[in-house]
Image (cartoon, coloured by chain):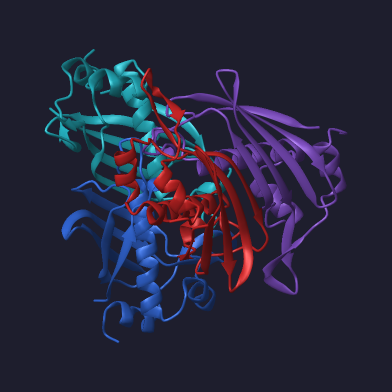
Chain colours: A purple, B red, C blue, D cyan
Amino acid sequence: MLSNTRTVRIEWGDCDPAGIVFYPRYFAMFDSSTTYLMERAIGMSKFDYLKTYKFVGHPIVETRAIFRIPTRFGDEVAIETAVAACGRSSIKIEHRLLKAGKLAVEGFETRVFVARDPADPERFKSQPIPAEIAARLNGDA
Amino acid sequence: MLSNTRTVRIEWGDCDPAGIVFYPRYFAMFDSSTTYLMERAIGMSKFDYLKTYKFVGHPIVETRAIFRIPTRFGDEVAIETAVAACGRSSIKIEHRLLKAGKLAVEGFETRVFVARDPADPERFKSQPIPAEIAARLNGDA
Amino acid sequence: MLSNTRTVRIEWGDCDPAGIVFYPRYFAMFDSSTTYLMERAIGMSKFDYLKTYKFVGHPIVETRAIFRIPTRFGDEVAIETAVAACGRSSIKIEHRLLKAGKLAVEGFETRVFVARDPADPERFKSQPIPAEIAARLNGDA
Amino acid sequence: MLSNTRTVRIEWGDCDPAGIVFYPRYFAMFDSSTTYLMERAIGMSKFDYLKTYKFVGHPIVETRAIFRIPTRFGDEVAIETAVAACGRSSIKIEHRLLKAGKLAVEGFETRVFVARDPADPERFKSQPIPAEIAARLNGDA
């Protein structure tokens, strides 16, 4: 399965009055990590692959996160992101955020690839993941 | 169990290029809903109850969310928030976000009340929830 | 000139480790206040007026803010928003954020109404503000 | 005068339904750029210099920004940040955000160094900038 690791610095503006990350910010970090993984799998920027494949996006249908160790501004953390399973139109992705080598946060997400519904462009419809992308996400190509 | 409902308007700045809520923003909304519930249970503003009880906060240790229907800027949604279980130092809270009466997002969270560790003020230690607060959260008082 | 006042509660997640609002959040509040003013002037939700008039938005070309008094989580503030000037395709808007009746933050912004460039839909082109909207923003209708 | 340049990637979650950066996010980027500049001047992380010098922070008292070219998700931009003037307890900082070498956004900010007021720890008092830090910010050391 495809995976990716990147380093993120926790910023002052990511933190709350307790001095630790305001937890919705972790999901924003995970969302970017997923983008990087997709871009690597597809070999295009998100802007380009949405346009090329006529996707509106790959919104999350379910997510779960476990917060083990708090992080605070100035911390440099590593985020390891990997495909856990890739189905017909949905994909499961896992994130492990490490602080000084220790598992601080775990994230699990299920996303669905969607396009605008031709019958009503304000609605989204799930789309099959193109075979060549699925192969790359599955680590087969 | 204590519960609370409030109305939230989805703003332009909550939404992403697909025109729907950027999902970390839902967690920010849920965090505020939890604050309102706590303030109602405790009868003080969060600023005052943190100071009165010497808590640094009640950070989340685990959360899960299911996204059923997208919402977009201009939508007025209702968020129903309720205590699911209140333990010795942790509390489970559930959120149901409704759009036009339909369940759009569900959120589940477990929080722990923490104070600064006297031995090392940069570390947090979990704290028992004061009996009178637990009673209110459990709907017993 | 058209004006509007609304009450906003400062949330925990709006604040930084100093316990006061992380200042970019004020701009998000001002952006919503501008939306409310526009909706009132135009008599439609932003979603509907963008679609009706084929605008992509009314992005800011210049802004300035003065921060006089800090605000913190739990504060209820009033935001007064008014049109300062309405030109052919641009509009100047001013915000006054009051805490307990005292001027805490002032914001000044200039926005331009834009549509997608037919020659290149990825580019934006400024658009004249429709006369009936300009009249309402100027308080003439 | 001290200066610093860094590269920032615009993320999906930084952008609004028009597909361009939601402008408050630029201020969050500038805030981080200022932190990097300060850390370089002081030779400590922000966490450490706040503690060492007993500052609560260096909040903004005035800011102005000019938005010349929109940026969108996937853009890699350079942010050049420089001290414009360093006074007794305040500092002026300027940011230039470049997209493909072109000036896209300019930011100007005035900050004041503050500490908690010993007479009332919930209030902030401006503080003189220590001479050795002012010297570094002025590029004299």
Quarter holding residue B61: top right
Residue D51, given in percent of the width and then of the height, sits at 29, 21
Residue D105, given in percent of the width and then of the height, sits at 39, 45
Q: Is residue C76 above or below residue A136?
A: below
Query: What residue occupies the far top of the structure in this picture?
Result: D141
Which quadrant, please, contains the C terminus of chain B?
bottom left
Residue drawn at the location 14% of the way across and 30% of the way down: D118
Between A95 and B38, the residue placed more toward the observer is B38
Residue C105, given in percent of the width and then of the height, sits at 23, 53
Between A85 and D94, the residue placed more toward the observer is A85
Query: What residue occupies the far bottom of the structure in this picture?
Result: C141
Residue D104 visible in rendering: no
Q: Is residue A79 above or below residue A52?
A: above
Q: Is residue A107 left or right of residue B132?
A: right
Residue drawn at the location 28% of the way across and 53% of the way down: C75
Residue D26 visible in rendering: yes
Quarter holding residue A41: top right
Q: Is residue B43 left or right of residue C84?
A: right
Between B47 and A96, the residue placed more toward the observer is B47
Quarter holding residue A119: bottom right
Q: Is residue B58 left or right of residue B17?
A: left
Q: Is residue D76 left or right of residue D92?
A: right
Residue C129, given in percent of the width and then of the height, sits at 39, 75
Residue drawn at the location 38% of the way across and 46% of the way down: C12
Residue drawn at the location 85% of the way across and 51% of the way down: A88
For the image, the number of numbered tags is: 0
